[in-house]
Image (cartoon, helix red, strand yellow):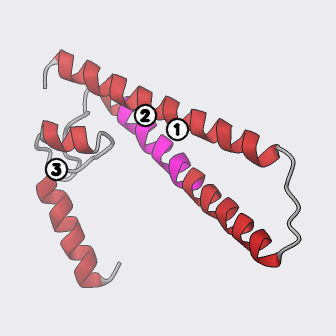
Amino acid sequence: MNQADIDSFREILRKMRQDILEQGEDTLEDMTGEREMYADPADRASAESDRAFTLRLRDRDRKLIKKIDEALERIEDGTYGECEDCGEDISKPRLKARPVTTLCIKCKSRQEQQEALHGD
C-alpha cells in the first residue's frame, strides 16, 4: 500500500471517530434535557425502549472507537493493512468496506466458519 492510500485510510478513520464522538455528544445533550412525562404507560414504555436502544447504539460506538484507535495505531507503527492471522496484505476493497479490520477476507471467512461450527 502506498503513502497516499495510508493517508486516505487515516483520514477515513479520523472522520469516523469524529462523527461517532459528535453523535455521542448529541445523545448526551438529548438525554440530559428535560424528560417528558407520559400519562399513558404505553407511551412511557415506548420512550424508555427508544432510550435503551439509543444507549445500546452508543455502546457499540464506544467499542468501534476503540477499534478505530487501534487501526490508527497500526497506521503509525506500519502494520495497517496486514492480516494479523496470516501476515498477508488485506485488500484495499476490504479495508474500504471495513477500515478497522485486522483480518484478510480468507482468514475472516475461516474464523466465521469455525465460530459457526463451535457455536461461539
Give the x, y percent position of residue 69.
45, 35
On the rendered structure, is 60 left or right of 30?
Answer: left
Q: Which residues are magenta?
A: 59-72
For the residues bearing labels 2 and 1, Cβ distance under 8 angstroms: yes
Q: Which residue is mark 2?
A: 16
Q: Quadrant of residue 88?
A: top left
At 89% from the left and 71% from the top, the residue drawn is 39
**In the image, is residue 71 part of the stretch drawn in magenta?**
yes
Dot 2, how many residues are within 10 Å of its Cα: few (below 14), some (14-19), or many (20+)? some
Q: Which residue is mark 1?
A: 20
* Picture disc at residue 104: 3
**Numbered disc 1: secondary structure:** helix
Tell me the mark number nearer the camera, choosing from 3 and 1: 1
Q: How many angstroms separate mark 2 from mark 1 (CA)?
A: 6 Å
**Numbered disc 3: secondary structure:** loop
At 33% from the left and 24% from the top, the residue drawn is 10
- The kind of residue on which mark 2 rests is Met
